[in-house]
Image (tube, helix red, strand yellow):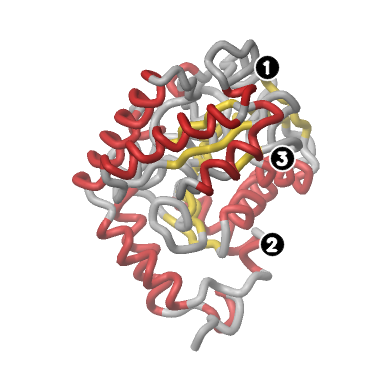
Amino acid sequence: GAGAGGSRLISGTRPVHLELEAALEEFFGRPALLFPSGYHANLALLSTVLQPEDRAASDALNHASIIDAFRLARCGRQVIPHLSTDIPPDTRLIAVEGLFSMDGDIPDLRAYPKEPWLFVDEAHAFGCLGEGRGAARAAGVEPDFLVATLGKALGSSGAFVIGPPELKALLVSAARPFVYTTALPEGVAAAALVALRLADSERRERLSHNASLLRRWLGQEGIAVLGEAHILPVLAGSSAMALSEALLEEGIFAPGIRYPTVPRGQERVRLTVSAAHSETELAACVDAFCQARKRIPTLSPDHEGPH
């Protein structure tokens, strides 16, 4: 009983999968289809709806799964500057993230042209922004296609695709990462279903409060923080891993992000705030940064490099 035992189309579909999809469909108001991971979902969606003769516009900081999906689709791909809304006229689909995971910023989704399909990966915004429905909902935009994961805000695993009824029928029939993949384990789907019910407005308000508070406190100490919302990247350059280790010694887990995940010179530690963090814990995080800065000269406020 630990695994589903087969693909969704053979023996893997269980009542909890249908219940979770129904809950997501009620939440978003459109059909939903589950996948074992966000990587699977992006590969399935983009490689199925795009043809080799199509051309896609992809934000320069899009996740690797989006890039690999375009490769699998064998379509044309134009990489556009990060957050640019200047889209080539022959574009069939625009691909962006609702909340970018490394810079923590949000594109102006209302500014993209209306003619191409708009695909938004809401992995880091689902559950947190737009009444939980993501950055697109917060901007008042309904993308043609949406992907979100169950392993970030909901703390489970897996992912789902949201789109029109025709999309769900197409993916069930033709998306290789759906047809040929074992379904989510029942326990994982059940955990996501419970988490969806627990991800309420009170938790989202606490999350927003905590993120704003930590950002302000770090800024008061001269520590520059990128982005917005609950992802707080702190640029540290070549000192990123040393900073991450120093913070861990102080009881703060802030992973170091280095090349090739980010460009050279843009290395950072990434803070991800939770609704469960207390103000005491957030204050301890700021204190840990101040202590680390004393030990790592390049993080000093008067140093010319990033800090």
Residue at 47% of width from left, 16% of height from top? 111
**First in residue order: circle 1 vs circle 3:** 3
Say which element carries label 3. Answer: helix
Q: Is residue 95 above or below residue 191?
A: above
Residue at 40% of width from left, 25% of height from top? 218
Left or right, 266 with respect to 31, comes to right
Residue at 37% of width from left, 66% of height from top? 20
**First in residue order: circle 2 vs circle 1:** 1
- Give x and y (percent) for residue 135: 40, 33
Disc 3 marks a residue whose amino acid type is Ile
Q: Is residue 135 visible?
A: yes
Query: For the residue carrying disc 2, how many other residues have a C-alpha within 10 Å: few (<14), some (14-19), or many (20+)?
Result: some
Q: Is residue 58 visible?
A: no
- Give x and y (percent) for residue 45: 61, 49
| Residue that badge 1 annotates | 88
Left or right, 201 with respect to 14, comes to left
Quarter of the image where the C terminus is located: top right
Cα–Cα gap, marks 2 and 1: 29 Å
Residue at 50% of width from left, 24% of height from top? 226
Q: Which mark is residue 176?
A: 2
| Residue that badge 3 annotates | 67
Q: Farthest residue toward the front?
A: 295
**First in residue order: circle 3 vs circle 2:** 3
Q: Which mark is residue 172?
A: none
Disc 2 marks a residue whose amino acid type is Arg
